[in-house]
Amino acid sequence: MSKNYVIGFPRIGEKRELKKVLEEYWAQKVPFSEVQNVASQLKKRHWNYQKDAGIEFISSNDFSLYDTMLDTSIMLGAIPKRFAHLEGEALYFAMARGSKDAVAMEMTKWFNTNYHYIVPELSLKDSYKLSATKIIEEYKEAKALGIKTKINIIGPLTYLGLSKREDGGDCFALYGRVLEIYKELLSEIAKLDDEVVVQIDEPLFVKDLSSEVLSLIKPSYDALTSQASNIKIAVVTYFEHACEATKVLVHTPIWALGLDFVYGAKNFEVLELIAKSDKVLLAGVIDGRNIWKSSYVQKVELLEGIAKRVPKERIITSTTCSLLHVPFTLRYEEKMDSELKSWLSFGCEKLEELSMVSRVFVKGLSSLKGEQKEAFDTNIKTMLARHDSERIHDKAVQARAKNLRKLQRDGVFEERIKLQREHFGYEDLATTTIGSFPQTQEVRQARRDYKAGVLSLEQYESEMKRYIDYCVEVQEECGLEVFVHGEPERNDMVEYFGEQLQGYAFSQNGWVQSYGSRCVKPPLIYGDISRPEPMTVEWIAYAQSKTEKIMKGMLTGPVTILNWSFVRDDIPRDEVSKQIALAIYDEIVDLQEAGIKMIQVDEAAFKEGYPLRVANIKTYEDWAVRDFKIAVSAANKETQIHTHMCYSEFNDIIKTIEAMDADVISIETARSGNELLKIFKEVGYKQEVGPGVYDIHSPRIPSVEEMVEQIELLLEVLPKEQLWINPDCGLKTRKWEEVIPSLKNMVEAVRIVREKLK
Ligand code: GLN
Ligand code: ZN
C-alpha cells in the first residue's frame, strides 16, 4: 500500500444498472428487493475495483439510491410535513420524485458540477431524530466482504448551507439541533470498530464564507471530534481552495484535511499552516472532474511541490473530489479510435493513476519493476504524443482566433432595432416560441434508425421535413408571429452541434449521473474547433420556404456548448470557448446568406459556468460575454439576434446580460411572477425581453384569462414596445395535445391585451 485515498466512487453502474432497475421499480415492474439486490452487487463491484487497484482508503456510504443529500435528510429525520404519512422506500422516493399527494422536493446543482441534489427543506418547528441504519449497514456490508471502509457523510455546515427554510429564514438557526444528531451519529459509528475513519464532506468551505459560517467551523469540529476517541475525522473540500476554513480547521482535533490542488491551486498558500499543525493532508491531485489521462510525471512533481512544505509522511495522495463526476470506465468504448482513447481516463482508469502516482511519490521511480515500469514509460510517451498530435492542432483556427479584429456587431442597439423593426414589421407583444416542439416517438425513432443505417439519408430527410411541415402548419393555425422549425433533427442542443464540429468526440458509454436515475453523456472537446460545413442552414431554409412568416434560426451559444462538454485541459478554457464562438459565427454568416435574418443563440448554461469564488467572476464574465459577442458579430444590423436563458434570477448578473447585447432575450420568469423582472427596469435595460408567460415544465394547459393577467402584470414592469410573449422554455418535453391549446390560448391572450391597449 502506498497511502492513497479515493473521496468517493460513482454509483449508477458501468452499464447504468442502477438507473435501469430504479426505473423498472418505479414502473412497478420489479419489487423493491430487486433494487436492493442490484445495489448490493454494485457496491461490491465498486469496492473490489478499488481494492484491486491498490486503494487504501475506500468509502462506504458514498452509494445512494438517489442522492446523498437526500440520504442526509433521512439520516437527520429532516422530513417535510407533507411526507409525514410515508415511510421506508415510499417516503424516500416521494421526497425525491413526488407522489400523488405531495410535490417533490426541489432539486438544484451541486456547486459548479452538473450533478443535482435534493434541497433539504427545514423548518423551525422541526425536531430531528437520528436514523443511522443505512450508514451502519453499508459499513458492515463492506466489512463482511473483507473491506474496511472509511465512512462518508456530508458535513453539517455544508448541509445547512445548502438547505432552505420553509419561511425563507436562515437555516443556521437550526445548527444546534442538527449538530446534536451528527454527534449521536458519531457515537453510533464509534461502536462499529476499534478505529473508524469518517470522511466529512464540507465543499461549502470552498465558497466565500460568511462570518457566521466561519465562526461555526471550530465549535462544530471541536464537538464532533470529542464524540469518540476511536474516530478519526477527515474533513474534505473540493472544486476550489478552502484557505479560510483551513486556517480554522488546523486548530481543531480533526485527523486529516482534504484539499483540491487541481481546481484550488491557492491551497498552496495554507500548506505552511498544515505543516505546523499535526494534520494529515489528503492531497487532491487526480482530477475527479475531467476525463484526461494524468501525466504521471507532472502529478508526482505536484506532490513533490507539496512535500516541500508539508512533511511527506503526512501526505496521502487523493482524488480531487468524488469520481461521481466522471464516467465509469473506458472498457466499453469499442468504437472510439485508439489514439483518442489512449489520452483518456475515466473512473476506473483514475484508480490506476492514483495507485501509480502515490506509489512513485512514496517509494520513488526505482520501486517500479516490469509491467509497472513499462506503464510509467508508456504514460510519458502518450502525453508527448497527445501534445504533438496533428489532430488537436489546427494552425488556421489558432491564427484566426489570435488575429481576430471583429469582436462585436456593427451599430448600437437603438440603431439596430429600428432597422429590424422596419424590416420585420412585427407588432408590440410579438408572439414566438423558444425553439423545440414535441419530440414525438416517431421523430426519435427516425433519428435512431438513420443513425443505425436503417433509414437512408433521403428517407430521414423526408421524415424530418414532414415534421417541420407540421410545425409550420401548427404555428399558422395557432396564429403565432415568429416561427421556429421545431428542432426535430436534434437529440440534444449541444450534442447536435458537437457532432458536426471538428475537434469534438463522443463516447459510447461515458455516462455521468445528473440526478437520480438520470445520466448525461457530455461530448469531449479534444482539439481545435472548427466548422467544416453548415450545421443548420438546410433545415431552417427549408422551414422558411414553407411560410411567409418570419422563421427564426436556432443555434446553441459558445458558452453553453463549452459548459456542457468535457473540455481539453491543454489550453485555457476561454481559448476553447473562443474557437467555438468562431464556429457559431460561421454558421450565422451562412444563415444570413440563406435569407434567415432572425437568429436565436441559446445560452441555457451561461449562468452554470459561474465560478464558485467571487474573485473569479469577473474573468469568467469577461470571456463569456466576449465569446457570445464574437459569435453574433457575424450578424448585420438588420439581423435580429435573440438569446434564451433557462432561469429567472438575473439580479446578480443583469449588467453582464446587458453587455451581451442581444436584441431580444427570452427568459424563464413564468414560475416566479414578475418580481424578478423588475431588475430589468431598475437598471434601465433597453433591449427587448420575452419573459415566459407560462410554465412548460408542467402538462397543464394555461387558460386565456391567466395569461392575460400575466401579460398585464408584465406591462406594469416593462413597456409594450419592449416585450415579447412566449412560453418559458422549449416545448420538446411536452405533447402536441398540450402545446397546441396552450399556444392558442397564449395568442388569444395577446389579442385581448392588444385590444385593451388600443
Ligand atoms: N432552443 C432550445 C429548445 O427550445 C432551448 C432549450 C433550452 O433552453 N434548454 O429546446
Ligand atoms: Zn430554456
Image (cartoon, grey):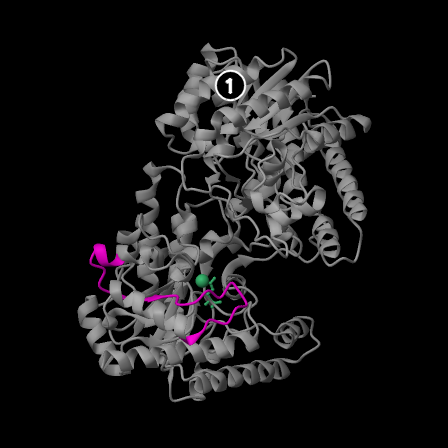
Q: Is residue 134 above or below residue 654?
A: above
> Which of 308 and 339 lies nearest the eye of the viewer?
308
Please state, as top left, top right, bottom left or bottom right, where the C terminus lies in the image.
bottom left
Q: Is residue 703 above or below residue 378?
A: below
Q: Is residue 458 left or right of residue 395?
A: right
Compared with 386, 281 (above or below) is: above
Residue at (32, 61) in percent of width and height: 630
Three-letter code for the amino acid on which mark 1 is drawn? Tyr
Which quadrant of the render holds ligand 2? Answer: bottom left
Q: Position of residue 290 (x, y in %)?
A: 54, 43
The magenta segment: 680-704
Q: Decide: is 450 above or below 83.
A: below
**397 within the magenta span:** no
Q: Main secondary structure of the magenta part?
A: loop
Report which residue position mark 1 lands on: 221
Report x, y in % for residue 149. Answer: 70, 26
Q: Is mark 1 within 8 Å of ligand 1?
A: no
Judge whether residue 102 can be spotted in this image. yes
Q: Secondary structure at mark 1?
A: helix
Q: Position of residue 327 (x, y in %)?
A: 63, 46
**Residue 646 in the image: x percent, y percent?**
43, 59
Can see residue 396?
no
| Quarter of image, res 704 | bottom left
Q: Is residue 467 left or right of residue 552?
A: right
**For this view, does 316 lie left or right of residue 690?**
right
Neighbor class of circle 1 (other Cα within 10 Å; few <14, some 14-19, many 20+) is: many
Of residues 185 and 59, which is closer to you in this image?
A: 185
